Amino acid sequence: MKQVHVAKHAPEAHLVKGFLESQGIDAVVRGEYLTSGWGELPVDVCSVWITDEAQFDRANELLVAFLNGSFARQFGAERWQCPNCGEALEGQFTSCWSCGAARPQKA
């Protein structure tokens, strides 16, 4: 296992973990339950680790793009409409925020 991100808090760590997993990289959050004692513990208590060290470079590259917003911007022009409720959605969304329906697969 290798650490790829030090989070400010547990929700940030889980957001990063979920993003990496959506890209096919298995990740875990460590130290999230220690944050209640943050005043007495080192700052890097809550962190995200990947299980396959061979994917570190890819994970790091994806994470930089995710955190600076460039990952989401690359899908901005791919707007789509929900087939279930008709809601107009931006390209970075994989499911409808209104009804939860999955984005249709491209033909």
Image (spheres, rainbow, N blue to C red):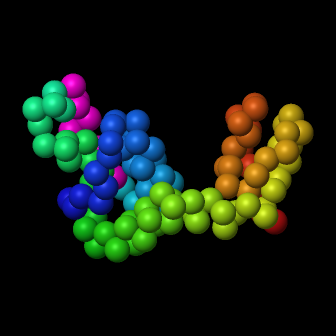
Q: Which residues are magenta?
A: 27-36
Give how far across and how far down residue 21 sits, in percent.
Answer: 44, 53
Does any portion of residue 31 appear in the rendered image? yes
Q: How many marks?
A: 0
Position of the C terminus, as image quadrant, is bottom right
Q: Residue furthest right?
A: 86
Q: Residue at position x 25%, y 68% from top?
A: 53
Which of the two residues, 48 or 12, is positioned nearer the viewer here? 12
Q: Residue at position x 69%, y 44% from top?
A: 95
Which of the two residues, 36 or 90, is positioned nearer the viewer here? 36
**Side of 74 relative to 29 (left or right):** right
Q: Residue furthest front?
A: 39
Question: Is residue 18 shown in magenta?
Answer: no
Position of the N terminus, as image quadrant, is bottom left
Q: Residue furthest top?
A: 36
Give how far across and how far down residue 97 sits, in percent.
Answer: 71, 36
Does any portion of residue 34 appear in the rendered image? no
For residue 81, above or below residue 32: below
Q: Residue furthest left?
A: 40
